[in-house]
Image (cartoon, rainbow, N blue to C red):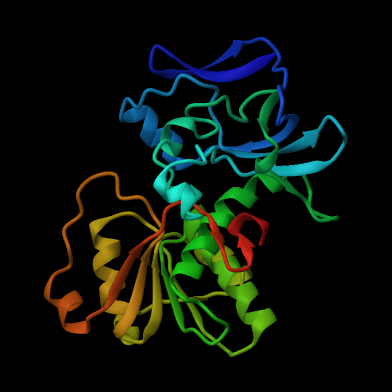
Amino acid sequence: MHAVRLVDGAPRVVDVAPPEPGAGWVRVAVRSAGICASDLHLIDAGFPVSATLGHEIAGVTDGGTPVAVEPIVPCGVCGPCAAGAYHLCDTAAFTMIGVGTDGGMAEALIVPERSLVPLPAGVALADASLVEPLAVAVHGLRLGGHTGATDTAIVGAGSIGLAAVAAAAHTVSTGGGGGRISVLARHDHQRVAAEALGGSVLDDPSAHQSTADLVVEAAGTADAFAQAVDLVRPGGTIVLLSIHWSPTPTPGIGLWLKEARVIPAMTYGAGPDGRDIDH
């Protein structure tokens, strides 16, 4: 079967043997797989990815069940796993599906049974690879204490930023509270998407300084971090939903004066209401 793997440091379509599931593993016929920016960063950084690429995955099991896939493969015995924080597993970065274990840019893959995320009726498999980035947003908002009453600003309107808009809008619409969702976007098509998902575009960020209870930084740049500090209210919270691949300077006195909490969000895990990816 066909799969996408790194050959001489570049992604190539290659022929590989079809996967056969062992005990506790399930075969999934892939129907959609997303290209994440982190895939490109890992390639550029020379990370030792030897497996088939792709951790944003949806497909159908051999039994005919439509599923998305949670790509974390925790060891189950390290300190974080024992504490229930399996997404912080000591070895997860090297065993993650699409990094250390064959991923979804293939005709089929095998995954641990625990990784299956059954899809509700009506969710198209062509769209369901977006379940994984949506889980990133759900996790970050949970860490930031987001509720329907939270005034939220989202800096960056790429795929993760827009996922945060959608997740926040869902909480506001189902939980009530009237929380505002403001979005700082660079491009016109991002602004259109943000508004369609339930956000309001910040045309003049300076008019909204120090007003947000929660700021989601979803761009991964020093400028975005600084903008998040400008927008957060004193005593508010900043969630770093993006990955900062190189050292980022702390915005300094503004962050200190506001005594804002800064919370990095790592993928997704489980909270009091179950797995982030099931929400």
Q: Is residue 244 above or below residue 29?
A: below
Quarter of the image for the N terminus: give it.
top right
Q: Is residue 157 above or below residue 74?
A: below
> Residue 265 location, x and y as percent?
41, 58
Residue in the foreground of this view, choosing between 118 and 41? 118
- Tell me if 155 is positioned left or right of 2 in this view: left
Q: Residue at x 43, y 44 (%)?
A: 89
> Residue 143 location, x and y as percent?
45, 68
Q: Residue at x 62, y 76 (%)?
A: 171
> Residue 18 location, x and y as percent?
71, 14
Q: Residue at x 35, y 27 (%)?
A: 47
Q: Is residue 263 above or below residue 103?
A: below
Report which quarter residue 30 is drawn in. top right
- Tell me if 250 is positioned left or right of 91 in this view: left
Q: Is residue 64 above or below residue 218?
A: above
- Tell me if 182 is positioned left or right of 232 in this view: right
Seen from this angle, which residue lies furthest bottom? 177
Residue in the foreground of this view, choosing between 101 and 114? 114
Quarter of the image for the C terminus: give it.
bottom right
Q: Residue at x 38, y 28 (%)?
A: 43
